[in-house]
Amino acid sequence: MAITEHKQMPRVLVAGCGKLGGAIAKSLLGQAEVFGLRRNPARIPQGVHPLGADLLDRQQIESVLPDDLDIVIYCLTPSSYDEQGYRNAYVRGLENLLAALGSQPLKRLIFVSSSSVYSQDDDSWVDESSPTKPARFSGQMVLEGEQTALTSGHPATVVRFSGIYGPTRQQFLDAVMNGRMDPASPAPFSNRIHEADATAVACHLVNLALEGKALEPCYLASDCEPVRLDEVVTWVREQAPCAAPQPDARKGGRAGSKRCSNKRLLESGFRFRYPDFRAGYRELIAWHQ
């Protein structure tokens, strides 16, 4: 009887309960019993069950890991931006968590990935079936993490987010307004997703999984308008007072030039709150003024 009552509400673990993971965990409250795992449990949002463990320490994970989990969301960012940092975050941490989970029968493992797994630099459209041959170690480690999730033996879904921006991620907007961004024209195509939509995508997939709906093994999560970087900068300058470009201003990004298709995500029933960069940045600029 106790087990039946215990299982009335789905149990979700967010492993890596930082900026994005914490927002996802907080959004799922009320519809699930949510556990957040990170090294510093004091920084886990209120209402989420805090679990303190280092994902590089399997014994620590095993000591705090709940049983009867329905969904696990793996949402790590590197603690250092070298190859070992990426391997620890995307591969070793996941391997340790999977070992600690053992034979728990998950409804879904969701792995938060990145569009950095694509290396296309020819303005082409990419989707979930496009070749993934990342040239940089960061994308290579993310791709290895994807394969670890997809071959884990659990039903798994990978979500490849493009560049996340929003109220807590304003580096690009600040750079434009302070004259530290001045891309050449025509600049490479850029792709982005507002952090509120990134959170909502994860929650949308969790809900589909809990409803027993079929999920694809991979979704590309980016807004509805890939756009050249110089066009975004020009638009921002038209909306708000910006400093003149500095002599050493950045000329572009490091992500090649591709256009991310969100067709599969839209076909799953997801709808964007911020379908293009104007909708998202207009709100952020208004807060600046």
Image (cartoon, helix red, strand yellow):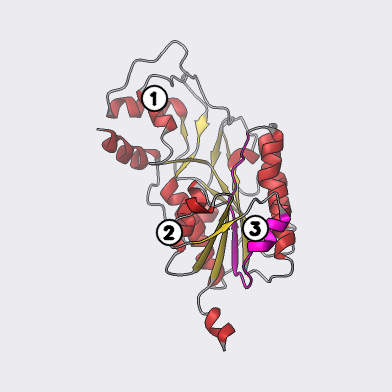
Distance of mark 1 from mark 2, alpha carbons?
35 Å
| Three-letter code, disc 1 | Val
Q: Is residue 264 above or below residue 259?
A: below
Query: If the image is split into quadrants, where does the N terminus sit?
Result: bottom right
Please report the residue visible at 39 percent of the width from the left and 30 percent of the height from the top.
Answer: 173
Does 227 lie within the magenta span? no
Specify which label sits upstream in the sequence, 1 or 3: 1
Give the x, y percent position of residue 54.
64, 50
List x then y, in percent, for residue 43.
48, 50
* Kind of residue at badge 3: Pro
Q: Which mark is residue 176?
A: 1
Residue depicted at 65% across the width and 34% down the height: 119
x then y, percent, for residue 73? 58, 58
Q: Any magenta on residue 77?
A: yes
Give the crowd class for mark 1: few <14, some 14-19, many >=20 residues within 10 Å. many
Q: Earlier in the sequence, mark 1 or mark 2?
A: 2
